[in-house]
Image (cartoon, rainbow, N blue to C red):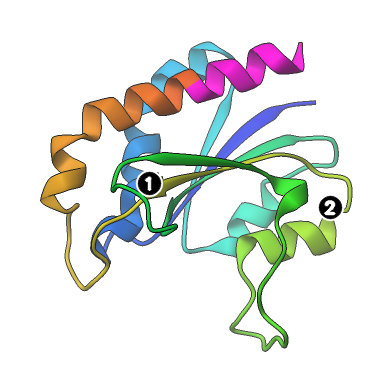
């Protein structure tokens, strides 16, 4: 069973790219612990193609839960429930694909609280000011996840 971090988001939409930017920054540190880092951006089909049966998946993404920007929310993938009542070919997200294709997938969603999503190349000031702390917390979360799996 391989541990894979899949970073998703859109770096052209401001804070929506936080998962990508954090993953790029901490990639070498995670790879030291044998964690594969996949920069998926918005290509959910590519992300899905990188998952193999038995993989332990951690999705790294921007999130909006109404908390302080930069805070991190951890949610088991099995607890993910899509809020959508109907689907079209354009409405599927990565978690929808995972739940359809990998019924017994194990892992977590690591949601980094965002502040601003708009057409902007770069993160908001509040996320930039807390970027080092966000990266450190994310690394610590990954190490805790690995430790708890042993």
Residue in the picture at 67% in, 80% down: 84
Residue in the picture at 88% in, 53% down: 103
Q: Residue 43 location, x and y as percent?
A: 52, 63
Residue 27: tell me if it is visible: no
Please count the marks in the image. Answer: 2
**Residue 45 placement: quadrant:** bottom right
**Which image quarter holds the N terminus?**
top right
The secondary structure type at the circle numbered 1 is helix
Query: Is residue 150 positioned above or below 136 on the image?
Result: above
Residue 148 inside the magenta-drawn segment = yes
Q: Which residues are magenta?
A: 141-150
Q: Which residue is labeled 1 in the image?
A: 20
Q: Residue 79 location, x and y as percent?
A: 74, 51
Residue 13 inside the magenta-drawn segment = no
Q: What secondary structure predominates along the stretch shown in magenta?
A: helix
Q: Which residue is labeled 2 in the image?
A: 102
**Residue 93 placement: quadrant:** bottom right
The secondary structure type at the circle numbered 2 is loop
Query: Is residue 120 positioned above or below 3 on the image?
Result: below
Residue in the picture at 72% in, 85% down: 85
Q: Residue 124 location, x and y as percent?
A: 16, 53
Closer-to-camera residue (53/83): 83
Q: Residue 72 location, x and y as percent?
A: 43, 39
**Which image quarter holds the C terminus?**
top right
Closer-to-camera residue (50/65): 65
Q: CA distance from mark 1 to mark 2?
A: 23 Å
- Packing grade of label 2 (10 A; few <14, some 14-19, many >=20) is some
């Amino acid at each position: 069973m391989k541990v894979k971090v899949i970073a998703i988001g859109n770096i052209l939409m401001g804070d929506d790219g936080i998962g990508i930017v954090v993953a790029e920054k901490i990639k070498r540190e995670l790879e030291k612990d044998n964690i594969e880092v996949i920069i998926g951006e918005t290509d959910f089909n590519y992300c899905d193609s990188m998952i193999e049966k038995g993989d332990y998946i951690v999705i790294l993404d921007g999130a909006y839960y109404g908390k302080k920007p930069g805070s991190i929310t951890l949610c088991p993938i099995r607890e993910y429930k899509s809020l959508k009542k109907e689907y079209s070919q354009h409405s599927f997200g990565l978690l929808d694909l995972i739940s359809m294709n990998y019924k017994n997938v194990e892992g977590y969603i690591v949601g980094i609280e965002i502040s601003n999503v708009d057409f902007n190349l770069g993160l908001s000031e509040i996320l930039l000011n807390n970027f080092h702390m966000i990266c450190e917390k994310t690394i610590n979360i990954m190490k805790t996840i690995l430790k708890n799996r042993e």
